[in-house]
Image: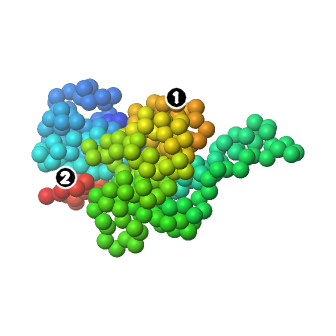
Amino acid sequence: MTKPAIIAVGKLHDRVIERLEDHFEMLRPASLDDVSPNDASRVEGAAVSGGFNAAAFQRFPNLKILSSFGVGYDAIDVKTAAEKGVVVTNTPDVLNDEVADTAIGLLLNTIRELPRAEAWLRDGHWKPGASYPLTRFSLKGRHVGLFGLGRIGEEIAARLEPFKVKISYHTRHRKDGVAYDYYASLKALAEAVDTLIAIVPKTEQTHKVINAEILSALGKDGILINVGRGWSVDEDALVAALGAGQLGAAGLDVFYNEPEVPQALLSMSNVVLLPHVASASMPTRRAMADLVADNLISWFKNGKAITPVPETPQR
């Protein structure tokens, strides 16, 4: 019996290919442009890391399902997918814990300057009579605002509770069953809290929404942590606020034009910078890879994907 043809594109985890090879005919072109029209017409599924635009959907007329490696799928034209009846899936939940853990670690590192303290020790400065300077900030007594309270946001909040900080949040709508204080606007949240953790996706509404006004509202003792998307922060405004002392510190795992990081941020001592590693552990990436494969296997075996995105519901 002929196996369905699956195209695998982008920087996919090796585990995806390992899982799929027994079930499908795998096509692994260097780029979509390298796929012949004959092969493109045979492709029924896709495993993707990265973008898939409208032209790509048109190129594969018999595509039925696209399984994306990652939670965010803003680089995939889901509108076109829906119009063509293609189900798009992502990898939610399996990375919630890892990203939430990273957010807490980044928060502590930023507030207590732990990377700088370690570098100070490694550089040989810890000698009799010499101690690392007292840190300006402490997590104790802080009011943390979560910009976004989806699956990962809820996990971050759960981890914050034992630290005995006050927790508030802003989302487009108040969430039922949530005890934290809700603020109807990001500005109102920023005015109320002294620590802002951003965990929002890349949408038109979140573009550079953390701007000079929001950073000013956080204040000179304010802390910004971003483990969502660099897209949501106005980096010029952030550099200006940090440089002028209008914002206390920032911890960033994501950047507007990554892997490019503004030189001004690299030179600042009140910033902790990570190379987008929130979900980057072997166990978590393996679980993500398994879900990519499982979505495709389930679709062709049972006619149902496991984690379809809401824009492309299964018929």
Q: 59 or 238: nearer the eye? A: 238
Residue 25 in view here: no
Residue 307 in view here: yes
Point out the frontmost of discs 1 and 2.
1
Q: Position of residue 83 (x, y in %)?
A: 11, 45
The count of marks equals 2
Rendering quarter of residue 171: bottom left
- Kind of residue at badge 1: Gln
Check disc 2 and report the residue beneath it: 312
Q: Is residue 161 left or right of residue 71?
A: right
The color scheme shown is rainbow
What's the distance in space between the residues labelled 1 and 2, CA to CA?
40 Å
Q: Residue at x 29, y 54 (%)?
A: 295
Q: Which mark is residue 263?
A: 1
Q: Position of residue 77 (x, y in %)?
A: 22, 41
Q: 116 or 72: nearer the eye? A: 116
Q: Is residue 170 above or below residue 55?
A: below
N-term mark: 1 or 2: 1
Q: Residue at x 49, y 39 (%)?
A: 241
- Kind of residue at badge 2: Thr
